[in-house]
Amino acid sequence: MLRWTTAGESHGKALVAVLEGVPAGVEVTTGMIRAALARRRLGHGRGARQAFERDELEVLGGVRHGRTIGGPIALQIANTEWPKWSTVMSPDPVDPAALLVDAGTGDEREIARNRPLTRPRPGHADLPGLLKYDLEDARPVLERASARETAARVALGAVAAALLDQLGGISLVSHVVRVGDVALPEDAPRPVPSDEERLSADPVRCTDPGVSALMVERIDRARKAGDTLGGVVEVIATGVPVGLGSHVSAERRLDARLAGALMGIQAVKGVEIGDGFAEAGRPGSLAHDEILSLSQGRVERATNRAGGIEGGISNGSEIRVRAAYKPISTVPRALRTVDLATGEEATGLHQRSDTTAVVPGAVIAEAMVALVLADALLDKTGGDSLTEARRNLTSYLARISERTRW
Ligand SMILES: Cc1cc2nc3c(=O)[nH]c(=O)nc-3n(C[C@H](O)[C@H](O)[C@H](O)COP(=O)(O)O)c2cc1C
Ligand SMILES: C=C(O[C@@H]1CC(C(=O)O)=C[C@@H](OP(=O)(O)O)[C@H]1O)C(=O)O
């Protein structure tokens, strides 16, 4: 079983992430994790922060000489701006007077940073968080609610992806299928893992360069209009063996685990497995994936509408899932709110912000799918070392092959 957690705030000193349950012997290097973090920083529509954020990574434990050692893997990602925030986010008590000065800069952002945030921003965790945690200031809520935390998840996802590749030959790819009202046609080519490099260099990770250009234009238009956008991303996993997840209980279902992990990403409001929502409008005769042949463990299907999962179990086809991101909550054309300090009408605070998070959203969704699949694969294989897990997988697949030899 894989267990993971993250800690840290958006403007704290650093984020940390811990992943437990990875067998010994998996090749993991700082370079691999850094590359995943660099992919998350790409993409059109990000705000000022991504231009300077360096995501400085340190591996604190669980890896020696480029291989996992079987213990919890601990990662740290520094927040580049920490020196500017060290008083506001100090873990030690600070003199309240120190928070009321603008550090002599006269800079609006500096002043806002130091003042209590009492005007909850619609679409953020601010209002429910303030009330639930009995706070006067929304700062502690937004610091942890921020999607900055997804850097830690992407770092963990890179380790999970290494395990999937080295244990099962499983690869993942993700792309953007919609930004606001600009969508990739349903019959557009789906990316295959070899497209990975090309896609990751695109300003919008979309398979069609024409649509990608329209998406870039749409994002620019939203930014100029003081608005924000959401969209849809797709993650595809190839090489997933039949038998991950289980029909026997709700929490072991692979579709439920994927949906939960994707919905756990900030701003994700919808998840689709395979043709999910379109399936609801089809007759049964056009909704399922007919089995054309089955030989030596290989299944040939006419279609893959199910997205590679039947009965909560991977069926050997590509796993295909989508996540819908709502538009960024901090709308530059500020939305109406109420100031909790006075009870008066106000507008939400707007500082620097992203116009859309859909492009990094694809990389983040891919990381979450990697973590779920790695967990499900280890459920199947067990094993304290990569060699043992591989041997177990090989013998399981050999049995399937033997049973389907006619
Ligand atoms: C990669 C990424 C970047 C984001 N950047 C911003 C941002 O710059 N400004 C903002 O208001 N919301 C941003 N968000 C969204 C909010 O953090 C999120 O919607 C908010 O915390 C409310 O949580 P909820 O959407 O889960 O309800 C981002 C989300 C993601 C996934
Ligand atoms: C820092 C990241 O995303 C941040 C997510 C975010 C939010 O409210 O979710 C708000 C912005 O942060 P800031 O207020 O510091 O500009 C984004 O930049 C990141 O993805 O690394």
Image (tube, helix red, strand yellow):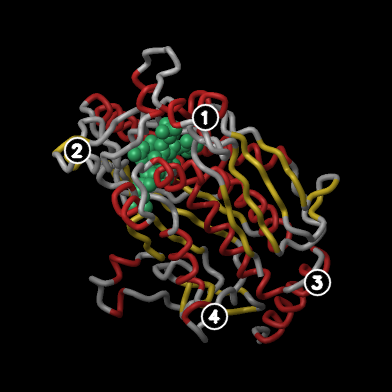
Give the left or right position of residue 149, taking residue 64 as reference.
Answer: left
Kindly check if marks 3 and 4 are in contact, taking CB atoms under 8 A apart as contact. no
Distance from Cα at disc 3 to Cα at disc 4? 21 Å
Q: Nearer the viewer, residue 362 or 142?
A: 142
The residue shown at (48%, 61%) is 261
Q: Residue furthest right?
A: 65
Position of the C terminus by quadrant: bottom right
Determine whether the residue tagged by mark 3 lies in a helix, strand or loop. Answer: helix
Q: Amino acid at mark 1?
A: Thr
Indicate which disc, 4 or 1, sits on the residue closer to the N terminus. 1
* Residue projecting furthest to the left: 345
Find disc 4 in the rendering and name its residue: 246
Task: Look at the numbered disc 3 and say if its residue's Cβ is closer than 8 Å to ligand 1.
Answer: no
Would you identify the image quadrant in which residue 107 lies? top left
Q: Position of residue 365 (x, y in %)?
A: 48, 52
The residue to which callout 3 is attached is: 391
Number of the front mark, 2 or 1: 1
Looking at the image, which residue is at 25% across and 45% down?
122
Residue 87 circle label: 1
The amino acid marked with disc number 2 is Leu
Could you tell me which residue is drawn at 64 percent across and 53 percent down? 161
- Quarter occupied by residue 274: bottom left
Residue 398 horizontal/vertical position (percent)? 74, 78
In the rendered structure, which amino acid carries the disc numbered 4? Ser
Where residue 348 is drawn, which disc sits there?
A: none
Q: Position of residue 200 (x, y in %)?
A: 53, 37
- Label 2 packing within 10 angstroms: few (<14), some (14-19), many (20+): some
Mark 1: few/some/many CA within 10 Å (<14, 14-19, 20+): some
From mark 2 to mark 1, how far is it between C-alphas? Answer: 29 Å
